[in-house]
Image (cartoon, rainbow, N blue to C red):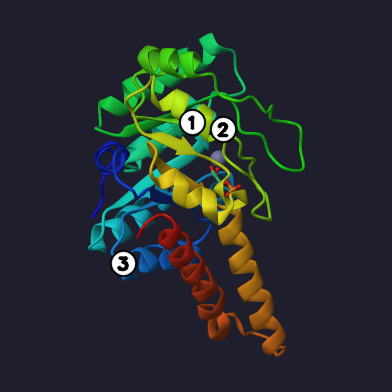
């Protein structure tokens, strides 16, 4: 069933579980994400960003993912990830997404508040949830995005100034890590959650070690973004399958193999998130 971020996350603020938010790029990884959630009887957030919209527009993504969510017995939130464009958020809202992220993390505080608030205003008209970001989670392999740990007082001010439903904070992770070598700053995380009363979001969780996953579930972190680990799983499955099937025209014969790799990875991560 399709759910919004707001209605999904609230119950996990005080539980020992957190909800996995998985970045997908095609039907072939969206399907195993939802299958894995159903097998674990877990709620799930399916999110699309630039890698996904490169090949398929938001209107089509909305129709596909909302239909998949409606058909599923588990709660599924359909979320636009890391949008830096108010009009793109509007397209996702119009396409039926139940949640959008406006990412103003690279802007000044004032611009971030102004544009995030505009998305909150538009989303509210359709009952859609909004995630914002304050502080900045950088990206491995590029310095195009600043690394800036979130300041607890500034997070509190940002939440009050924008009215977002969930807030992404920078507390030790880095996007696109291919090894699980990152550690969370739990003192900073606790200082933040003492000041705000809404769900917290961790980006770049592919790089997070298993031990921190478990500890994180006991905090107000309720949305845990995982992208790179899934793409690596799909890639490994596809390469293995192609290697085992050197003949041509094989995709229809082997597609289930990378899909299974993704399903297994999601099941593993959902286990670390308490499901
Ligand atoms: O917004 C997406 C996530 O933060 C994914 O990050 O690819 O490093 O897991 P990741
Ligand atoms: Zn992210």
Ligand 1 lies under 8 Å from the Cβ of mark 1? no
Q: Earlier in the sequence, mark 1 or mark 3?
A: 3
Q: Residue at x 28, y 64 (%)?
A: 41
Q: Are marks 2 and 3 in contact (CB under 8 Å)?
A: no
Compute the Cα span from label 1 to label 3.
30 Å
The location of residue 187, given as percent across then percent down, is 52, 30
Q: Earlier in the sequence, mark 2 or mark 3?
A: 3
Q: Earlier in the sequence, mark 2 or mark 1?
A: 2
Residue 29 has which mark? Answer: none
Residue 189 has which mark? Answer: 1
Q: Relative to 61, say whether 259 is above or below.
A: below
Q: Of the residues tagged 1 and 3, which is closer to the observer?
A: 1
Q: Are marks 2 and 1 in contact (CB under 8 Å)?
A: yes
Query: Does residue 66 appear to the left or right of 55 in the view shown?
Result: left
Q: Residue at x 36, y 24 (%)?
A: 164
Secondary structure of the residue carrying numbered label 3:
helix
Q: Of the residues tagged 2 and 3, which is closer to the observer?
A: 2
Image-quadrant location for residue 124: top left
The location of residue 249, given as percent across then percent down, is 64, 84
Residue 171 has which mark? Answer: 2
Label 3 packing within 10 angstroms: few (<14), some (14-19), many (20+) = some
Compute the Cα span from label 2 to label 1.
6 Å
Label 2 packing within 10 angstroms: few (<14), some (14-19), many (20+) = many
Please name the residue that numbered disc 3 is placed on.
38
Secondary structure of the residue carrying numbered label 1:
helix
Q: Nearer the viewer, residue 12 or 91?
A: 12
Compute the Cα span from label 2 to label 3.
30 Å
- If the image is split into quadrants, where does the C terminus sit? bottom left
Q: Relative to 21, say whether 191 is above or below.
A: above
């Amino acid at each position: 069933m399709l759910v919004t971020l707001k209605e999904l996350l609230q119950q996990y603020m005080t539980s020992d579980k957190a909800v996995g938010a998985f970045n997908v790029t095609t039907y072939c990884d969206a399907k195993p994400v939802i299958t894995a959630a159903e097998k674990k009887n877990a709620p799930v957030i399916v999110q699309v960003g630039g890698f996904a919209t490169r090949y398929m527009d938001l209107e089509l993504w909305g129709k596909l993912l909302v239909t998949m969510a409606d058909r599923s017995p588990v709660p599924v939130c359909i979320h636009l990830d890391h949008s830096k464009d108010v009009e793109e958020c509007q397209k996702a809202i119009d396409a039926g997404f139940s949640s959008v992220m406006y990412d103003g993390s690279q802007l000044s505080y004032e611009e971030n508040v102004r544009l995030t608030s505009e998305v909150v205003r538009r989303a509210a008209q359709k009952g859609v949830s909004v995630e914002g970001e304050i502080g900045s989670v950088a990206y491995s392999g590029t310095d195009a995005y600043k690394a800036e740990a979130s300041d607890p007082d500034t997070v509190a001010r940002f939440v009050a100034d924008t009215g977002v439903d969930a807030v992404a904070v920078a507390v030790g992770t880095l996007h696109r890590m291919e090894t699980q070598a990152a550690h969370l700053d739990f003192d900073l995380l606790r200082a933040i959650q003492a000041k705000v009363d809404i769900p917290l979001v961790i980006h770049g969780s592919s790089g997070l070690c298993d031990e921190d996953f478990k500890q994180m579930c006991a905090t107000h972190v309720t949305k845990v973004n995982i992208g790179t680990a899934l793409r690596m799983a799909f890639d490994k499955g596809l390469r293995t399958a192609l290697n085992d099937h050197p003949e041509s025209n094989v995709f229809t014969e082997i597609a289930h193999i990378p899909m299974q790799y993704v399903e297994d990875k999601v099941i593993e991560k959902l286990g670390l998130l308490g499901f």
